[in-house]
Amino acid sequence: MNISEKFNISSKAKQDGFLRMKQLKEDSGKKVVGIFCSYTPIELILAADAVPISLCGTSEDGIAFAERTLPQTLCPMIKSSYGLAASDSCPYFYFSDMILAETTCDGKKKMYEYMAKLKPTHVMQLPPGRTGYKCLDFWHGEVLRAKEAIEENLKVEITEDKVREAIKEHNNFRRALLDFYEIGKLNPCPLPGYEISKVFESTHFMFNEEEKIATLKNITKSVYEEWKEAKGENRKYKPRILITGCPTGGLQDKIIKKLEDLSVDVVAFESCSGPRCQELLVDENKDPYWALAEKYLQVSCSVMSPNPDRLSSLKRMIDEYQIDGVVEVILHACHTFAVEAAMIRDFVTKECDKPYICIETDYSESDTGQIKTRLGAFKEILEANL
Ligand code: BJ8
């Protein structure tokens, strides 16, 4: 029995959560805040006793509808997110009382202007870099403005004590998630990367922090126990892959599964689907709004310029997870990740001396065969390098 079956982690966690969210709203009157990005300070939503829900589109659904308004040549995640909302096909958008958005890439921030016509939408203005004049001061102001917007839209009061409490609670979630990701460091890795990504995804659709933490802890414990019992002999060694680039939420079957079908292990994610955004905890001893501002400004996404932390994070992960090769995944029309790709390729191949491949794709099936062929050729390179 695999981990998903054992812990009832459905491969359709998103669909399965619809009913639970409906009940949550009807039974307890919980408020729901739709979010899209790792820069969003979730603790403010938890401090308002509301539920954060990811509204990122991760399939082709909604894209055709979105293209009535948005350009075809836009990132599929942006089109899918907007199309599902605008066509009234996303129950989570329907249940959301407000949207807490952010100005990350150009496509997303302009899309929010349309989204704001559908639902109360507050957009946090993210500085384009971390090191410019008063960036942190500015972002701290945006954290305070977001707090006020949540209070106004949800008709609640967010006290400093509640924010402190939410910071502690969410730090505990981060710790549990980081411990779970450590499984990827075991060699051979006892858990396929497909399962790792499904477990991570399922936490987006658990609406209670304690439930998320308990589930992650139980899974981690169970994997280690089995691993110890089998003395690592329950899995044989396969080339170990790190995925970097855009979030892979909509590409699990198209890329992660395809890699694993080729008998390689996806063991690490240097992206918003991995530990990158969790590694730095929010300081529990500082002014909570400054602590949130400091933490979230450190997310090393390509929308930041410059973005050197992504390179140091890659190097550390390649070493710690004993990586044999890096697969970069870029969603069509994601300019920031596409521009960084040459830098990442040179860093991985020259500084880290590892094979690298870049796959640019979308959520459609049209390039599945081509991707399979390219990944097959990449595996041969990996084996030749072992
Ligand atoms: S912190 S990765 S969640 S911005 S893939 S919509 S950047 S064009 S998803 Fe992201 Fe926040 Fe960064 Fe993470 Fe734009 Fe690129 Fe599309 Fe993207």
Image: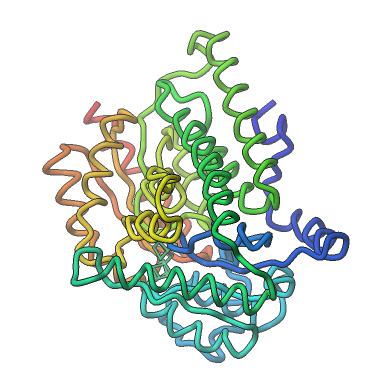
Please state the total of marks drawn on the protein image: 0
User: Is 104 located above or below residue 71 in the figure?
Assistant: above
Q: Residue 277 location, x and y as percent?
A: 41, 50
Nearest the eye: 42 or 223: 42
Q: Residue 262 location, x and y as percent?
A: 44, 37
Nearest the eye: 85 or 235: 85
Nearest the eye: 45 or 11: 45
Residue sitting at 20 percent across and 54 percent down?
A: 308
User: Is 299 located above or below residue 128 in the figure?
Assistant: above
Query: Which residue in the rendered view is the most extreme toward the right?
Result: 27
Q: Residue 306 location, x and y as percent?
A: 19, 63
The picture quadrant where one finds residue 31 is bottom right
Nearest the eye: 307 or 229: 307
Q: Quadrant of ligand 1?
A: bottom left
User: Is 219 located above or below residue 225 in the figure?
Assistant: below
The picture quadrant where one finds residue 336 is bottom left
The picture quadrant where one finds residue 241 is top left
Q: Residue 299 location, x and y as percent?
A: 35, 56
Residue 374 horizontal side relative to residue 190, left or right: left
**Colouring convention used in this rendered image of the protein:** rainbow
Which quarter shows the C terminus?
Answer: top left
